[in-house]
Amino acid sequence: MCSSDLPPNVEHLDRYRRAEASARRQRIGIWAHPDYQPAAAAELDKTRTGYRFVEGQIKRVGKNRKYIYFDLAPDFSIAIKRDHWYYFGGEPQQWQGKKIIVRGWISRWRDKLQMRIGHPAMIEMISEE
């Protein structure tokens, strides 16, 4: 069995997210470093590949045979495999308009930037306060 075929362990995900959110607010440890502050999706240029934190609002939801896509900017999208969507829950269209922070590896795909999301811990909904 390939490691990508294993279901994600999300048993303590809420606890980890709360601890991380607290450390980010207080800028403790790595969370004080500028590289760990989310970049705005609309401000990314095509040289910003590599591991990043990105923040933005989902402008468009699309699907193809293998992936569900969420466009956060004209040149930046995230992609989740359709057969992994079960771990994220709900209908993809419900994410339209939501503000999110994503983390992962950005690569160039068809002259645009894309981040593939493989685990629910890689995406966080930002509450509207």
Image: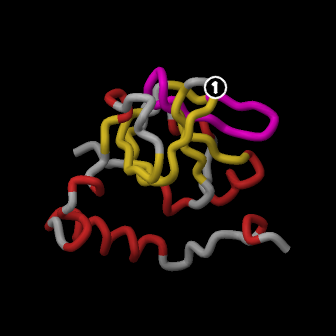
112 shown above or below 126: above
At horizontal 18% and vertical 63% (from top left) the residue drawn is 32
Within the magenta stretch, is there residue 71? Answer: yes
Image position of 119 (left or right of 12): right
Q: Position of residue 61 (x, y in %)?
A: 58, 29
At horizontal 54% and vertical 43% (from top left) the residue drawn is 115
Q: Position of residue 22 (x, y in %)?
A: 23, 69
At horizontal 39% and vertical 76% (from top left) the residue drawn is 15
Direction right: furthest residue: 1
Q: Nearer the viewer, residue 74 or 92?
A: 74
Q: Which residues are magenta?
A: 62-76
Secondary structure at numbered mark 1: loop
Direction top: furthest residue: 74
Within the magenta stretch, is there residue 96? Answer: no
| Residue at numbered disc 1 | 110
Q: Quadrant of the C terminus?
A: top left
Q: Nearer the viewer, residue 87 or 20?
A: 20
Q: Position of residue 17 (x, y in %)?
A: 38, 68
Q: Amino acid at mark 1?
A: Arg
Q: Quadrant of residue 41?
A: top left
